[in-house]
Amino acid sequence: MPKTTQEKPEKKRFSGFIFKLAVAAAAVYLVVSFVGGQIRVADKQRELEEINQKLEAQVEENADLQRLMESDDEDAYVERVAREKLGYAKAKERVFVDLTGE
């Protein structure tokens, strides 16, 4: 019988250690999950800002196109598209391109 009384405190210590280990593992898991979630939230916020900037640019372009459709100045539009999108120029006209990116 003395052996059984000695085993009980050892079992309690072992089960207490296992419980502490499980709590520590759960805490580490929760911290890692929280940090990962915060990183994903920050990424999505940056993505949202980029999409909002693209949306604003598209709204401006749509407003320009709407103004063009409401006006009868199609020649000016065709000339602007030819210059900006297609790279055309008038005869004997010199075009300077800013390569600095500003």
Image (cartoon, helix red, strand yellow):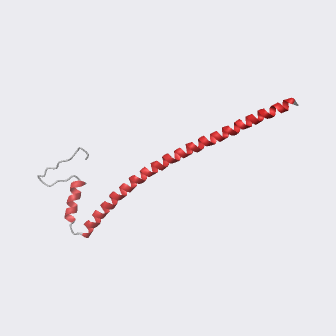
State the residue lying farthest toward the left. 92
Residue at left 22%, top 61%? 78
Q: How many marks?
A: 0
Residue 29: x and y, percent? Answer: 60, 42
Residue sitting nearer the eye, 63 or 68: 63
Residue, far right: 1
In the image, 68: left or right of 6? left
Quarter where residue 80 is shown: bottom left
Determine whether, in the image, residue 39 is placed left or right of residue 19.
left
Instruction: Identify which residue is drawn at 30% across, 64% down.
Output: 63
- Does 55 sit above or below residue 99? below
Q: Residue at x 74, y 34 (%)?
A: 13
Location of residue 87 with respect to 68 vertically, above or below: above
Above or below — where is 101 with respect to 15? below
Tell me what residue is drawn at x 21 percent, y 46 percent.
98
Q: Is residue 31 above or below residue 59?
A: above
Residue 100 lies in quadrant? top left
Quadrant where the N terminus is found in the figure:
top right
Q: Position of residue 8 (x, y in %)?
A: 80, 34
Image spot of residue 102 (x, y percent): 25, 47
**In the image, 53: left or right of 83?**
right
- Give x and y (percent) for residue 33: 56, 45
Judge left or right: residue 53 versus residue 27.
Answer: left
